[in-house]
Image (spheres, helix red, strand yellow):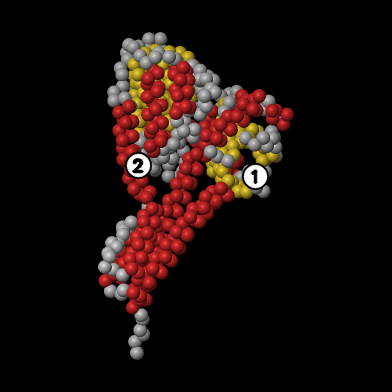
């Protein structure tokens, strides 16, 4: 005697599996993508803030803070305010500066946003904390204390000793609570599970009810609708025909509701397509703004390279002729990615370009641009910019810096104490758009025939290879030292780009690469 299986089970069992699998796959995909995007944004935020502080913090102020009694001095307050501004801009949980005692093998708080105390022991050091002192590289750290677990990045603060040799005076740490990340993940799961379970229960219960009333064509239509949904036709709905029994009408409505709920989980796909169109528009606007041809000035060679790593670029540059013998150069890097970064880039570049026609000094141009950006861009965004004015007749350079990577001055005479020479500039150097309470200063430099200037964004030194190693400043310095003294501006940029690409070895990069080179001939 054959085993008899009711038709309702034969029909609904596969359908139930399809519904549950479809909802489960949709929820899992949405959860993974959201979690990965959050992690990427967190890593980028931490990396930018520690690199910015390590690069821009004034070591001279640090050296004036030695004992717990210095906690409320003007120097400590100034440094703490800078850390607090960076903490707010980057939206991280903690920022602090740690020093080390090699003999006792202990780390101590130096300056931090929480007033922990000068020289108070840091009990949670990891090998990665110490590695940052040794290799002068950025490292990810994980540790726990009595309040919870933390994830963050540390970066070295490098200064030069009396002999001009770089060494690490301290490290800066920016971190986030792991519990906060776990709560975000749990909140997402709590939102998805009721939708998946409830949708499955409602759909299966209604399917059983409809099958009891009608077994033939309406059931097949419902089955085909579920298969369409499983095949990826999200939002697929069934027609409500008046000739069909009321119970099946209810089931059809429930199925359509479930399909729409699943489609809502995948609206990110359509949003992505819309974003791609916006990115294309933003890219076209950016390309229209950047120079098509570089102006020619007697006595100067100028070359530029801009390689965006995505559809739109946060990097930009400009070369503006100010008469027969004067050039204005600008190079910048906007925080963030995608359309917001592109819009801030356009606003920054347009403002700088407009102010260039006023004949104001580089520092005054940065001051006015900063005022405009503080009022008009999101608080979480900023723009790092260098602006320079070059006189070909006098071979002079006047420049001001707002949080951008320090450029190289490459002397034609190689027997210099520092070769290549970093132009560190005067005054504070926070990026534009962070605070109105800053005034930039001009730095005049006298150059000579054959000298070269190399401006570049952090996409050069932060280029990564397959081993997660950064290209770094040291490799760039070694490359510049190896080049001939009579090299042309374009050849210099080609040599740097080729060396970075050789180091990266086809590894995907996440930051744009932009360079400007100028030579006095």
Q: Earlier in the sequence, mark 1 or mark 2?
A: 1
Who's the residue at 45% across and 46% down the image?
37
Please tell me which residue lies in front, 63 or 333.
Answer: 333
Q: How many marks?
A: 2
Q: Is residue 11 above or below residue 108?
A: below
Q: Quadrant of residue 487?
A: top left
Q: Which disc, if any, is residue 124?
A: 1
Whether residue 17 is visible = no
SS class of the residue under badge 1? loop
Instruction: Name the residue carrying label 2.
Output: 275
Instruction: Tell me the crowding category of disc 1: few under 14, some 14 to 19, or many 20 or more residues within 10 angstroms, Cα based.
Output: few
Observer able to see residue 80: yes
Q: Quadrant of residue 369?
A: top left
Residue at 35%, 26% in the rendered image: 304
| Residue sitting at x 69%, y 28% | 72
Where does residue 75 sit, x and y in percent of width and height? 64, 25
Q: Position of residue 144 (x, y in %)?
A: 62, 48
* CA separation in Å, label 1 and label 2: 43 Å
Q: Dot 2, crowdedness within 10 Å: few (<14), some or many (≥20)?
A: some
Residue drawn at x 34%, y 38% as measured from the top left: 279
- 490 on left or right of 100: left
Figure quadrant of the N terminus? bottom left
Quadrant into which the C terminus falls: top left
Residue 502 placement, left or right of 381: left
Q: Nearer the viewer, residue 268 or 384?
A: 268
Residue 130 in percent (x, y) is at: 60, 40
Q: Nearer the viewer, mark 1 or mark 2?
A: 2
Q: Residue most toward the right?
A: 69
Q: Secondary structure at mark 2?
A: helix
Q: Which of the labelled discs sits on residue 97, or is there none?
A: none
Q: Position of residue 517 (x, y in %)?
A: 38, 23
């Amino acid at each position: 005697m054959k085993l008899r299986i009711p038709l309702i089970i034969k029909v609904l069992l596969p359908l139930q599996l399809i519904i549950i699998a479809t909802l489960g796959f949709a929820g899992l995909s949405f959860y993974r993508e959201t979690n990965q995007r959050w992690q990427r944004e967190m890593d980028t935020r931490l990396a930018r803030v520690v690199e910015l502080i390590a690069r821009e913090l004034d070591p001279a102020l640090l050296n004036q803070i030695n004992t717990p009694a210095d906690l409320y001095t003007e120097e400590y307050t100034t440094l703490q305010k800078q850390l607090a501004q960076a903490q707010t801009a980057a939206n991280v949980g903690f920022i602090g500066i740690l020093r080390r005692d090699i003999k006792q093998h202990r780390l101590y708080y130096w300056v931090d946003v929480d007033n922990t105390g000068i020289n108070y022991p840091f009990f949670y050091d990891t090998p990665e904390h110490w590695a940052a002192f040794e290799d002068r590289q950025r490292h990810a750290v994980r540790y726990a204390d009595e309040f919870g677990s933390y994830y963050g990045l540390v970066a070295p603060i490098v200064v030069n000793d009396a002999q001009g040799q770089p060494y690490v005076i301290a490290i800066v740490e920016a971190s986030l609570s792991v519990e906060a990340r776990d709560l975000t993940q749990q909140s997402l799961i709590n939102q998805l599970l009721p939708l998946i379970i409830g949708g499955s229960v409602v759909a299966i219960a209604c399917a059983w009810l409809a099958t009891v009333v009608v077994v033939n064509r309406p059931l097949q239509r419902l089955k085909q609708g579920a298969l369409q949904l499983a095949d990826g036709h999200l939002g697929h709905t069934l027609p409500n025909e008046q000739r069909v029994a009321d119970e099946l009408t209810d089931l059809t409505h429930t199925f359509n509701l479930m399909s729409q709920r699943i489609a809502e989980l995948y609206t990110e796909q359509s949003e992505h397509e819309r974003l791609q169109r916006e990115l294309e528009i933003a890219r076209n606007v950016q390309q229209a703004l950047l120079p098509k041809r570089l102006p020619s000035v007697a006595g100067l060679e100028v070359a530029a390279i801009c390689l965006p790593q995505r559809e739109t670029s946060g990097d930009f540059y400009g070369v503006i002729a100010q008469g027969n013998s004067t050039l204005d150069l600008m190079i910048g890097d906007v925080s963030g990615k995608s359309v917001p970064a592109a819009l801030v880039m356009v606003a920054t570049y347009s403002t700088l370009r407009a102010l260039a026609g006023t004949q104001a000094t580089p520092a005054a141009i940065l001051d006015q641009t900063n005022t405009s950006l503080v009022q008009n861009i999101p608080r979480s965004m900023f723009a790092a910019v260098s602006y320079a004015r070059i006189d070909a007749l006098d071979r002079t350079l006047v420049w001001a810096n707002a949080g951008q990577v320090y450029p190289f001055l490459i002397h034609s005479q190689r027997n210099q104490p520092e070769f290549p020479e970093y132009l560190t500039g005067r005054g504070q150097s926070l990026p534009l758009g962070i605070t109105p309470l800053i005034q930039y200063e001009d730095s005049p430099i006298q150059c000579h025939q054959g000298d070269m200037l190399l401006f570049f964004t952090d996409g050069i030194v932060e280029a990564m290879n397959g081993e997660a190693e950064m290209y770094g400043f040291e490799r760039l310095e070694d490359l510049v030292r190896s080049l001939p003294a009579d090299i042309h501006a374009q050849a210099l940029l080609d040599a740097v780009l080729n060396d970075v690409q050789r180091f990266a070895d086809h590894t995907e990069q996440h930051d744009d690469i932009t360079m400007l080179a100028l030579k006095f001939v």
